[in-house]
Each structure stands twice: as structure tokens, then as C-alpha cells.
Image: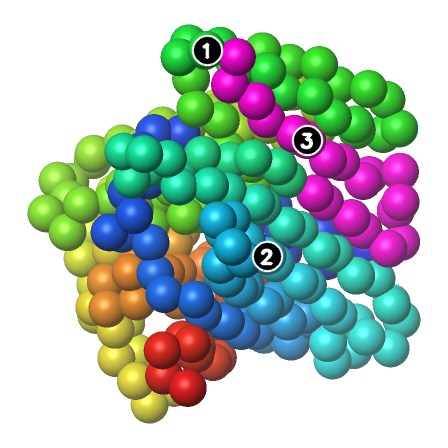
Amino acid sequence: MAGKILALVIGIFSQTLQAASLPDDFEAHYEVEKYSTTIAEMTLSLSRQGQDIIYQSRTRPRGLLAMISNDKIDETSRLKQTDDGSLQLLSYHYNRKDRPKDRQQYELHWQDAKTLKISGEYHHKTVQLEADTKVWDGLSIQLALMADISPDAVFNSQYDYTIVDDGQLKHYQFEYLSRETLRIGNKSYQTLKIRRQHDKKGKRISYFWLATELNNLPVKIEQYKKGELNLTMQLTKFKQKKDD
């Protein structure tokens, strides 16, 4: 049960990502609550290593969950900046301490302007996929959305992405809802509210509040299951390297 809860934290979170929209190197910490109780902490970080851009997520149990689980979930997306200033995903790695069989990793290679080859491993099985569009993973898709959403977003505008996950290609769609001023602790953020419906019947829906002053980084996420609030993630600390 504890492992399922921690995995949901990861599940809560294509097109062109312009270099101008990419934030400076940063580290962001989130507190994860379930039924008003802290269960985990997620840390997101973005860093540049030579020509590569590394986006990482680390999720660890906290509070009561930490007393019964030592689970750890780590994700790493490696990307590159192309000549036109956009980003391309190069590789993705997912590891979970308590469920090593869920480990997945992929390498992405463009054969030509229209053919993307994806090779990797999921559940200890070899994965070979092909696509004719830009592909992201469940982590780097956050960067894609952060860059794609316009400050002049129009109500009901949609953002569609292709991601590689669980050894297959999937379709993610996000919908812009509204602008909201959101107060977290002693700070107020101007945000863009986004919705993602995880399934056709709407049994699981996530809402994202993207702070415009933080390059559209999510400052709050809520996930609902069958109409009831299931999980909440909220930013607790944010630091950019340029502030050092």
C-alpha cells in the first residue's frame, strides 16, 4: 500500500520547447499530502552538464509513511538543445527501490527528419518503438508544457503530447482553464490553471497551477479520483543557481 501511494506522486505529473523558455538551473521541493497528512517529499532539479540538460525527480517517504516504507523513486531525463533552439529528449531512466521490475529506460535517436527510433527496457523486456513526432517521457513533459503554455492562453486551449511510458507510446492532453492568484505560505503567485484528464471516463483528473514568475513551474498539483481529492502537492522551497 505504501508503495502504491508513493508511486501516485510520480503519476500526477512533444511539441517545441524553446531555449528562451527554459529556466535557469534550479531545485524545487514539494510536500505531498494525502488526507491532510504529509506522506512524501518530491525534489525536482534542472542542471546543465556540458551540452546536455538534466532534469531529475526524487521522491521519498515522509511522515507516517516513512515509518512503514523505505521506498525511493528516481527519474532522470537527459535532453539536448538543437540548432533551432528547441529541446529533444535523448534518454530517460526510472528506478523504484521497492519494485525493481518496474525499472524502465529508453534511448531516443532521430534516423532522419521524420523517423524517431526508441530503444530501451521495461519489466526486463526489450522495447523497440518508432515515431514520426517528438516524444517525451512522464518527467520531461513538464518542461514541454511549461514552455508551450502561452501567457496569453485562451480558455479551453489544449496541449497534446506523445510520451514513452510502460514500454509504449501514449497520448497526454492538457487543457488551460483559467488564471488564478494562489497563495502558498506567505507568498502569492500569479498562476495558469491546467487540467489533465487521465482517462476517457474522467475517473482520475489532475489540476496544475503554473506560476508565471517561475517560468510556469507547477507550484501546486491536486489529483482527484472519482470526484474526491486524492493527493495534493505544494511547493515548499525554490532556489535558482543564479541566486547563489
Tag 2: residue type? Gln
Q: Residues within 10 Å of mark 2 (few under 14, many from 20)?
A: many
Q: Is residue 87 magenta?
A: no
Q: Disc 1 on helix, strand or loop?
A: strand
Q: Which residue is mark 1?
A: 112
**Residue occupied by mark 2:** 56
Quadrant of the frame with the N terminus: bottom right
Q: Is residue 135 left or right of residue 33?
A: left
- Image: 66 above or below 17: below
Secondary structure beneath dot 2 equals strand
Tell me if residue 128 can be seen: yes
Relative to 58, 242 lies left or right: left
- Tell me how far mark 3 sits from mark 1, CA to CA: 19 Å
- Residue depicted at 40% across the width and 12% down the height: 113
Q: Pinpoint residue 32: horizontal percent, then vertical percent.
A: 59, 68
Find residue 50 and report its horizontal and vertical position in percent. 51, 55
Q: Is residue 62 left or right of residue 235?
A: right
- Please state, as top left, top right, bottom left or bottom right, where the C terminus lies in the image: bottom left
Residue drawn at x 68%, y 31% as measured from the top left: 106
**Magenta region, mostly helix, strand or loop?**
strand
Residue at mark 3: 106
Please give the range of residues in magenta: 93-111
- Of marks 3 and 1, the one in the foreground: 1
Q: Are marks 3 and 1 in contact (CB under 8 Å)?
A: no
Q: Position of residue 230 (x, y in %)?
A: 58, 56
Q: Image check: 199 left or right of 1?
A: left
Q: Is residue 55 above or below residue 204?
A: below
Q: What whole-number distance in Å separates the C-alpha atoms at marks 2 and 3?
A: 15 Å
Please tell me in which quadrant of the rendered image residue 241 appears.
bottom left
